[in-house]
Image (tube, rainbow, N blue to C red):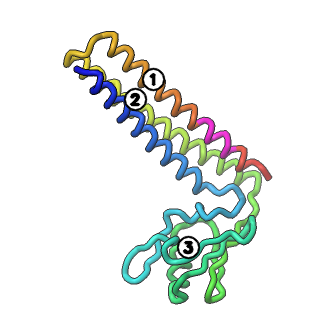
Amino acid sequence: MTDADVKNLLTETRSLMHKALEHFEFELSKIRAGRASAGMLDGIEVEAYGARTPLFQVGNVTTPDARTLSIQPWDATLVPAIEKAIMQANIGITPQNDGKVIRLNIPALTEERRKDLVKQAKHQAEACRISIRTVRKEANEKAKKLKSDGLPEDAYKTCETDIQNITNDNTAKIEKHLEVKEKEIMTV
């Protein structure tokens, strides 16, 4: 076994944990904190021209103020399809259209709703922690296999320590993102 095998293992571990963290950040961006954000519409697909198309590819999404999202379709015939897609996405906001522009008015959050959103954020954080621990477990198993294939004991121990350090770094990032999101949600 060579140092290159260990290096590849560590690189793969970093990459997989980074993907889990990116997914967590994406999921957090979908949790609204009382302010209008175009990210709230991520993942919504519109039935347009016989295909499912991301909302951002059929119109211009803007935030005219802190409590309003505005969607200006490039093709006015898509207004009903966009409205239907938003309703089906179940984001808790009823679209209003004037025939040309769809507006989404973001209601102010109640204290109870804010607490529910914090719970959602914590749930997403726990799911990310589980993903990271799973990646760590798989990396440690691969390191054991490298050891059984001839990796020296000291290199194995160093590899194990590096895997744990990568895990600790990513877990700290999760906590930081969660703390920022909680603060954002609870700020009135």
Q: Residue at x 60, y 46 (%)?
A: 121
Dividing the picture into quadrants, the one containing residue 71 is bottom right
Q: Residue at x 49, y 46 (%)?
A: 22
Residue furthest out toward the left = 149
User: Which residue is more in the foreground, 31 or 70?
Assistant: 70
Residue furthest out toward the right = 188
Q: Nearer the viewer, mark 2 or mark 3?
A: 2
Q: Amino acid at mark 1?
A: Gln
Q: Is residue 44 above or below residue 17?
A: below
Residue 157 picture location, percent across and down: 37, 14
The residue identified by callout 2 is 136
User: Which residue is more in the foreground, 175 or 86?
Assistant: 175
Q: CA distance from mark 1 to mark 3?
A: 44 Å
User: Which residue is more in the foreground, 166 or 99?
Assistant: 166
Residue 28 picture location, percent across and down: 58, 50
Q: Amino acid at mark 3?
A: Met
The answer to whether mark 1 and mark 2 are in CB contact below 8 A is yes
Specify few, some or many for label 3: CA neighbours under 10 Å numbering under 14, 14-19, or 20 or more: some
Residue 137 picture location, percent across and down: 37, 28
Specify few, some or many for label 1: CA neighbours under 10 Å numbering under 14, 14-19, or 20 or more: some
Q: CA distance from mark 1 to mark 2?
A: 7 Å
The answer to whether mark 2 and mark 3 are in CB contact below 8 A is no
The answer to whether mark 1 and mark 3 are in CB contact below 8 A is no
- Per the image, is 79 magenta? no
The residue identified by callout 3 is 87
Q: Earlier in the sequence, mark 1 or mark 2?
A: 2
The residue identified by callout 1 is 164
